[in-house]
Each structure stands twice: as C-alpha cells, then as structure tokens.
Amino acid sequence: MEPKYIFVTGGVTSSLGKGIICSSLGLLLATRGLRVTIQKLDPYINVDPGTMNPYEHGEVYVTDDGAETDLDLGHYERFLNIPTSQENNVTTGRIYYDVISKERKGAYLGQTVQVIPHITDEIKSRVKSIGESGKYDIIIVEIGGTVGDIEGLPYIEAMRQLRYDVGRENTVSIHLTLVPYLKAAGELKTKPTQHSVKTIYELGMQPDILVCRAEMELDHSIRRKIAQFCNVENEDVIASLDAKSIYEVPLLMKKEELDRRVLKKLHIRAGRPRLTDWSRFVHAVSYPDHRIKIALVGKYVDHQDAYLSIVESFKHAGAANNCEIDIVWTSSDLLDARNVGDRLGDVSGILVAPGFGARGVDGKLAAISYARENRIPFFGICLGMQCALIEYTRNVCGWKDSDSTEFNADTAYPVVDLMLEQKSIDDKGGTMRLGAFDCRLEKGSFAQKAYGENLISERHRHRYELNNQFKDQLVENGLRITGVNPDRDLVEIIEIPDHPWFVGVQFHPELKSTVKKPHPLFVDFVKASFEHASQNKTLLSNHSQKKPQTA
Ligand code: GLN
C-alpha cells in the first residue's frame, strides 16, 4: 500500500487539543491493524525547543535518538506505544538551518533561494521521507499554530503541494476549529468555524473533515449548517466535546466515527478498531478504589505543562495500582526546613522534579531531608537525584558544603560535577547528554525489583553527573549505587537501602511511560506510596463517582 498522509491544521484559537486528536486518531487506526506514525511541524525559528524555558514551551520531550522535541510527541508515544524520533518533529529553525547550510555548500548555485520553492520543498521532503521509509501505512502530520499565522504559511503551502505530489486520494485534510457557546444568545456559534475554513481555503487547502471542539453536543441542524457553509459532508462534521481526561478522546472519536470517515476518504479497508484494553484503562483512571497524595516538588509548579510526562506517568501508574494520585504541587522556592513539615505533612510520597539552575534547590533539599528522615517514599528524577546526593552527603556523610558544581564551582565536595565531555562545550543547543543509554541494575535493588530486568535503557537530558571520585566513600556511608551505564561507568541510579523506597535516577523515566506500558519505577513508587498511606492512615476518601458495573 502506498503511504497515506493525513494533514491536521487548527483554526480559531490555539489549545483546541490538536495533539490529542492526532494521537486519538492514530490510536484508532493502529488498533485497526495499520502502521501509523505522527509528525509535528512547528513554525518557530528555534532549531528545537531545547533552548526554551518551560514557561515558553512546557516540557521538552526527548526521544530515544536524542532529539529534543515538542511535548506533543509525548502524547503520540503514550497513545500509540511506539517510539518517535528526530524525524517526527520538524521546526522552521531546522528547515532554514538546513537550507542555508546547503546554500553555503553551493547546493543551489546560480539560484535565488526563496521560501517557495526551497523552504517548501525542504518541508515536503521531511514529510515524504517518513512516508517513503516504508515503515508506515499512515503518516499523520500535525501542523503547529493556527491557520492564518504568518509563520505557518509555508507549511500550509507545502501541504497544498503535497496533496498533488502524492495524489489527492492518498491524503486527507482535517481542520480543527472551535464552536463556542454564547451564553447571552443561548446558542452554539458556527461563524468562527466558517471564517477559519475560509482562511484555509484562501491558502488553497480544502478541509475534508472538520473536528469541532465544543462544550456541548452539536445537534443535527448545527452539523448541517457547518457542512453546508464549509463545503463538507454532514458526516464529516465531527464533534470533539470537552472530556474529563485526554484518554477518553479516542473513545469519543470512535463514537463520532472519525477513523471510519478518514479510511473512507483514503480508500482503505481495515479491521475494526479494538479499544477493549484502552476502555479498561480509562475505567481504571475514572473509578479508582483509592486515592493518595503525592507531592511534586519543582520550581515550575505554576506552569504544569513543564512536568506533563510526569503527570501522565502518574495516571498510568495510578491505574495500575487502582489508585488516584492527587498531585500536591509544591513550589521548591517556597519550601524550607521550617515549613516542610506543614506543607508535606499529609503526603504519602515525594517526587523531586528535574530542572536546571540553583533557584529552588534549597527547597528541594528540605523536601528530600523530610522524605529521608520520615521514611516517606521518595523519587528523584535527574536534578532530583542530584539533589538527593547533595542532601545525603551533607546530612548523612557530614560533608558540610557538598554541592553540584552547577551551583557552587568551589565546593570542597563536588559530588555532582560536569561530565567530562561537557567541559569543552560552549554551545547550548542540542549539546547535553541526550537520548537513550543502557543501564545495568544491581540485583535486589528497588529498581531491579521494579523492572524485573537486569539491563534497561532510559532517556537522558543532562550535563552533570555523580562524580565517580566519591563513589567508594558514598557506598561506605550507606548509599547504594544500583544502576550504572556499562559503557562509561556513569552512575544512573542511587538508593538508600534502609528506607521503605528511596530512589534517585539520572535519567527521565517519565518519557517512556505509556498507557500500554506504565513505567515500572512509577508503578513501584505509587505502590510504595500507597502502602505508606495505608500504614499511616493517610488514604484519602475516594471522590470519584459511583463505579458503573461494566467497563
Ligand atoms: N541541571 C542538571 C544537569 O544538567 C539536571 C538536568 C535535568 O534535571 N534534566 O545535569
């Protein structure tokens, strides 16, 4: 079968949930037996989001091959349970960078290099190269931003051309819009959708299917009206109603038959969508028997997209433990040794988040001391693990000014130090230790028991590491090193064995948790937190609605 392309654009406003619609459609098609991938085209000029701060961009999602990418790729992986890679995220910065590099090498000798055709050709080649890899039947292409944005124009033009290049019958164009409810008029309004479709028409693209985000059901007359004004069939007006959880969206899209309409237009016959396991998961998320509080300590807690994969990992692990996780968002800036007991007194687990820079580190250290001394399950990720090392060496080993050289270059105890190869690097973009690396686990450790394996592979994004010069002394002082990268002897996991559950990891387990495969460390951390809650009588009352009989 020739590869088929589904182009997904958005109109009226941002935040309509394009990434979730793409993921949901991808899942529906994949469960029908098709090989699906999703590619995100981002119209900003950064080469990748790695240099943006979380307020600008939310979480930076890292792939196995070490690409720093948009957080939507996390949704793609969590829904489809297949890894993405560098080719799944294209930015304007990357496109221009490559075109200009080629120009310097003389690839366009004699020509004026222009947006059309050179930039648009480069965009098309990125999309087509996934299609031509032979790995997928369907490539869903999500175009970031909103139609009409100046910076998005080359992408829409490239899609317009692609529809002819690969044949109209091999493409579908889906446009997401908003159908707002006007309280004063007591009506859903279709005009913004009509305008949005008009804008995309002016750019030469005709949407085949409209996915209309709305707060309430679109009745037949509204659907008819939208169809009529926007030149699509009635059945191609799909309602995307607000859902309690993003994981319900595939079920809603199945009900609206989005996948069936897409397959019809692509002339593909495929099996039926199978969502039994997915429905079971949604049921487990919606109606857990238990509820516990876990603190997430970080400096971006007022901007929760910064920790998106951690939040989603908790949902997966919660479902696996029949337990809802009430995340207690705890700003590390506001935490200190005096108030930590008040702020974290009723939590059953403490997670200290990844991060960069000295701000908030003291608060993280206070949270870690509290977890260690009060035997509360503790999970430290990346900077969270490095902080656990600092806390342990200061307060257990008694090395008073131990630190990471990221925060204090002159410390007598640089227990966390810049990795050797980082010392000669000045550029900031794409230069960290990025992507998947192996890690060998110590038998009988918390980690090895959680994974049930001896060799794992996890994704990284950091410049600093545990300083191996202190390894023996740390072990003598009771810390256990339970995960090491076999190729370079880098410490990847530390644990305190005499504790109910105390694990710090240098990698980012949250980037590999999916609905189908909840991450073992999150599952085990939630289990330990649940046990802590049961023993300390801090189980919360379950506030989910009455459980229906069947899933
Ligand atoms: N700032 C630390 C480092 O670069 C931790 C990074 C992180 O938490 N992702 O090593």
Image (tube, grey):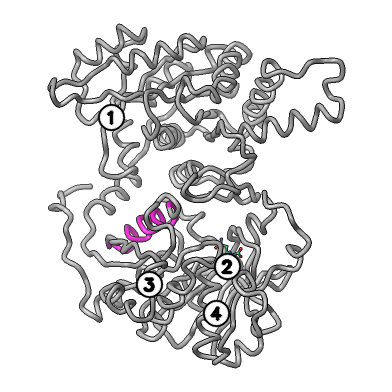
The residues colored magenta run 308-323
Amino acid type at mark 4: Ile
* Identity, as a three-letter code, of the amino acid under mark 2: Gln
Q: Of residues 223 and 469, which is closer to you in this image?
A: 469
Q: Residues within 10 Å of mark 2 (few under 14, many from 20)?
A: many
Q: Does 313 appear in magenta?
A: yes
The quadrant in which residue 238 appears is top left
Kindly state the secondary structure of the residue where label 3 is placed: loop
The residue singled out by tag 4 in the image is 390
Tell me the residue that label 3 is attached to.
335
Residues 77 and 271: in front is 77
Q: Residue at x 41, y 21 (%)?
A: 175
**Residue 32 point in image, percent of width and height:** 43, 33
Q: Amino acid at mark 1?
A: Lys
Mark 1 sits on what residue? 255
Distance of label 3 from label 4 (alpha carbons): 17 Å
- Whichever of labels 3 and 4 marks the residue nearer the N terminus, that label is 3
**Mark 4 vs mark 2: in front:** 4
Name the residue rendered at 40%, 10% in the picture. Answer: 198
Q: Name the residue located 20 percent from the left edge and 21 percent from the top edge.
A: 188
Q: Earlier in the sequence, mark 4 or mark 1?
A: 1
